[in-house]
Image (cartoon, grey):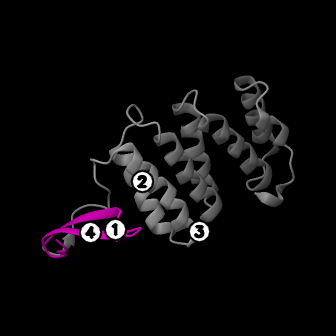
Amino acid sequence: SNDKINGEYTKYFKNGTIELYRTYGNGVPKEKWGISEKLNSKQLDAILEYSQTLINEDDIKTALRLLNSIMEKYSYNDNVIIPKVHLKLADIYNIEINDYDRALKEYTIISEKYQNTKEQPLAIYKIIRIYKCKVLSADMELIKQNEFLNMFPGHELAHSFNNDCTGD
């Protein structure tokens, strides 16, 4: 039921296949917008994919709501999608919002928390690029480059450290 006074209010996206809920009491929201806690991995994949569509359409707010809700309601232990979701969130702060402090914080968490995932080297690489192209700290750039090379010797991204900043 769509009841903004008492009960649950639902917003539908992507032809009704994705839903955001919010509970109201006396017309006041009781919590943040969120997704269901009972979604399967295919549904979570669909939300992650759809978040990119939202970004392309400049609806950053909804993309953040969906991705943050996945992070809050699903644990990494049960869901391989979590590092991908976290990386997408960090990318939004980095690329769409230009909040480099927040992006660096999120990429750092990704690099420490999700060992042996594809997202781990990517996160450190993106930290290197922020220090090279956005926040401009040669010291930190070098420290993170060395960290990357120690952790991932021979990784293909190492060749891109010094690419110019036009694409960043």
The label shown at residue 16 is 1
Q: Can you identify the residue that label 4 sits on?
A: 10
Q: CA distance from mark 1 to mark 4?
A: 10 Å
Indicate the quadrant where residue 58 lies.
bottom right
**Quadrant holding the N terminus:** bottom left
- Tag 3 or tag 2, which sits nearer the N-term? 3
Which of 9 and 142 lies nearest the eye of the viewer? Answer: 9
Q: Is residue 26 above or below residue 132?
A: below
Foreground: disc 1 or disc 4: 1
- Tag 3 or tag 1, which sits nearer the N-term? 1
Which residue shows up at 56% across the image and 28% down it?
A: 115
Question: Could you tell me residue 19's position as x and y percent?
Answer: 32, 63
Indicate the quadrant where residue 96 lies.
bottom right
Which residue shows up at 46% across the image and 60% down it?
A: 64
- Tag 2 or tag 1, which sits nearer the N-term? 1
Which residue shows up at 32% across the image and 58% down it?
A: 34
Q: Residues within 10 Å of mark 3 (few under 14, many from 20)?
A: few
Foreground: disc 1 or disc 2: 1
Q: Can you identify the residue that label 2 sits on?
A: 68
Foreground: disc 2 or disc 3: 3
* Amino acid identity at mark 1: Gly
Mark 2 falls on what kind of element?
Answer: helix
Tell me if label 2 and label 3 are in contact, CB under 8 Å.
no
